[in-house]
Each structure stands twice: as structure tokens, then as C-alpha cells.
């Protein structure tokens, strides 16, 4: 996506401008709060064909085994990230009571499973409170 929008820094700046985020877009990192803002905007505009297409792509990712591991298939619209000892997963859980989940880790042993267990616990709790 960054390639088609003039580079990664340029595409980040476009997103930050759209969401009125003041943050250095030239660096290749992002905060959990910004991830949350992006996902919130995406979900709030899910009826727009472009944003619904993005959600569809995020739901059909080939990268599984973290946030979505213990959830019913097709509920998690998510994006993983891995770099050195950093392991992340961010997404929207699209059940009857949708929510956004942003999990960043650094140096966590077996991080994929830790993320999966956190996601599972939150999903189970969310399922209980909506009843």
C-alpha cells in the first residue's frame, strides 16, 4: 500500500492527516493509540465500500495464529507485525458486540500464544457481558 501511495512515510502522513494525528510519520513505527485510532476510523466508516473492502482483506489474512487463534473463524479483521523481539497483532473483533484489540509485545517468550490467550480471554469476557 505504501508503495502505491508514494512511500511508507507518505502513506502514514496521509493517514495521520485524515485522522488529525500529530506524530512523526517519517519514522517506521507507530503507537498502540494510533493503531486504535486507525481501527476505530476504519470501523466507523465500514459502510464505505473502500473501508469495507479493507475490513474484508483484514478478515481474510493468511497470517493466523495470534489474535484469531481461538476465535470463531472470520470474526477477526487483524494485522500482525513482527520485528526482532517485537511481536504484535491489532484488529477488530466483528462479533455481535464488536471491539478493537491492540496487543504489542517486546521480548515475550512464545508471544504468538500469549497474544492468542489474551485475545481468547477478552473474547470470552466480551461474550459474557453482552448477554
Image: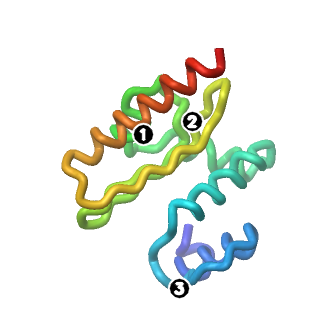
* Distance CA(mark 3)–CA(mark 1): 28 Å
Placement of the C terminus among the 4 image quadrants? top right
User: Visible in this render: residue 92?
Assistant: yes
Kindly identify the residue that appears in the image at 73 percent across and 75 percent down.
17
Q: Looking at the image, do the residues carrying marks 1 and 2 touch, with CB atoms under 8 Å apart?
A: yes
Q: Which of 42 and 86 lies nearest the eye of the viewer? A: 86
Residue with the most extreme top position = 131
Image position, residue 54 (x, y; %): 63, 50
Q: Quadrant of residue 104?
A: bottom left
Q: Is residue 6 visible?
A: no
Residue at 57 percent across and 61 percent down: it is 33
x and y, in percent, of residue 11 in the image: 61, 75
Which residue was labeled with disc 2? Answer: 93
Q: CA distance from mark 3 to mark 2?
A: 30 Å
Residue ID at (53%, 44%): 101
Q: Residues within 10 Å of mark 2 (few under 14, many from 20)?
A: many
What SS does tag 2 mark?
strand
- Give the residue pinned by disc 1: 67
- Residue 26's tag is 3
Q: In the displayed structure, would residue 51 be above or below residue 16?
A: above
**Quadrant of residue 121 within the rendered picture:** top left
Amino acid at each position: 500500500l505504501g508503495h502505491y501511495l508514494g512511500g511508507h512515510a507518505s502513506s502514514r502522513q496521509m493517514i495521520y492527516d485524515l485522522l488529525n494525528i500529530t506524530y512523526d510519520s517519517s519514522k517506521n513505527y507507530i503507537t498502540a493509540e494510533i493503531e486504535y485510532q486507525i481501527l476505530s476510523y476504519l470501523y466507523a466508516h465500514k459502510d464505505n465500500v473502500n473501508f469495507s473492502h479493507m475490513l474484508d482483506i483484514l478478515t481474510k489474512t493468511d497470517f493466523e495464529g495470534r489474535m484469531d487463534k481461538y476465535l470463531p473463524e472470520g470474526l477477526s479483521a487483524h494485522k500482525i507485525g513482527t520485528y526482532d523481539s517485537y511481536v504484535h497483532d491489532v484488529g477488530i473483533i466483528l462479533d455481535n458486540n464488536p471491539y478493537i484489540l491492540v496487543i504489542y509485545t517486546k521480548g515475550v517468550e512464545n508471544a504468538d500464544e500469549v497474544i492468542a490467550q489474551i485475545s481468547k480471554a477478552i473474547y470470552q469476557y466480551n461474550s459474557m457481558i453482552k448477554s
